[in-house]
Amino acid sequence: MKILVNGIQSNLRFSSAHVIPGHESCGFIHGHSYFVDIEIEGERAGEFEFVVDFKDVKGLTKAICDELDHRMLIPVYNDLIDFKDFDKEKDSIFDLKKAKSVYFKIDGKGYALPSVDCVFLPLPYTSAEELSKFFAETLAKKLSETYDNLEYVAVCVNEGIGQGAMYRKDL
Ligand SMILES: [Zn+2]
């Protein structure tokens, strides 16, 4: 059986700024009011014969949304982002979080931002595609700590109403 959670109606939302390095129109800092839909399939199980408790799904997803909300999303492993004093091959993302400010260049454009205003993600892009994969994998990992009856966790990250990307993580 499948359960569905509607992101708008369940308040699974976040508003963030991002940039898609190298993209003609999305290569400038801009923002989206994202919302996150979820679909989970699995066997019904346990005392109440739930697939999964909605409260668990919503709580875990809300926690990820809150982490990203009102921040600039930085895809640390993007090839076009050239960080100052940070080596993608050797240094830990924690070093970026710990620093007071972060400095980087994209195609010769220089950026200086307070680290607390940013979320550093281990991704090549902060596209809806990559964000949906990030949400699905994070959520699947957390849910599998308490559930062993789930077949897959699919997450659709919508960049506003009308366009989103869905990623399915099989368990
Ligand atoms: Zn965008």
Image (cartoon, grey):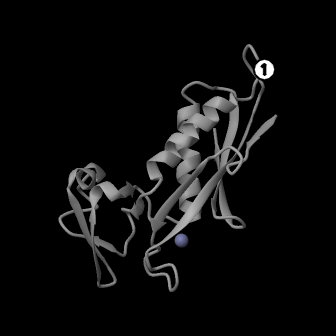
Closest to the observer: 80 or 112? 112
* Residue drawn at point x = 50 percent, y = 40 percent: 63
**In the image, residue 126 above or below residue 9:** below
Say left or right for 100 vs 65.
left
| Location of residue 38 in the rendering, given as x and y in whole percent from the top left corner | 68, 46
Q: Amino acid at mark 1?
A: Glu
What is the residue that sits farthest to the top in this orientation? Answer: 47
Closest to the observer: 84 or 58? 58
* Residue drawn at point x = 67 percent, y = 63 percent: 164
Question: Crowding at label 1, few (<14), some or many (≥20) Cα neighbours within 10 Å?
Answer: few
Classify residue 73 by image quadrant: bottom left
**In the image, residue 92 above or below residue 82:** above
**Is residue 38 at all visible to an observer of this figure?**
yes
* Residue drawn at point x = 43 percent, y = 75 percent: 29
Ligand 1 sits in which quadrant? bottom right
* Residue drawn at point x = 54 percent, y = 54 percent: 14
Closest to the observer: 66 or 61? 66
| Location of residue 113 in the rendering, given as x and y in whole percent from the top left corner | 28, 66
**Is residue 125 at all visible to an observer of this figure?**
no
What is the residue that sits farthest to the left in this orientation? Answer: 85
- From the image, tell me which residue sits under label 1: 49
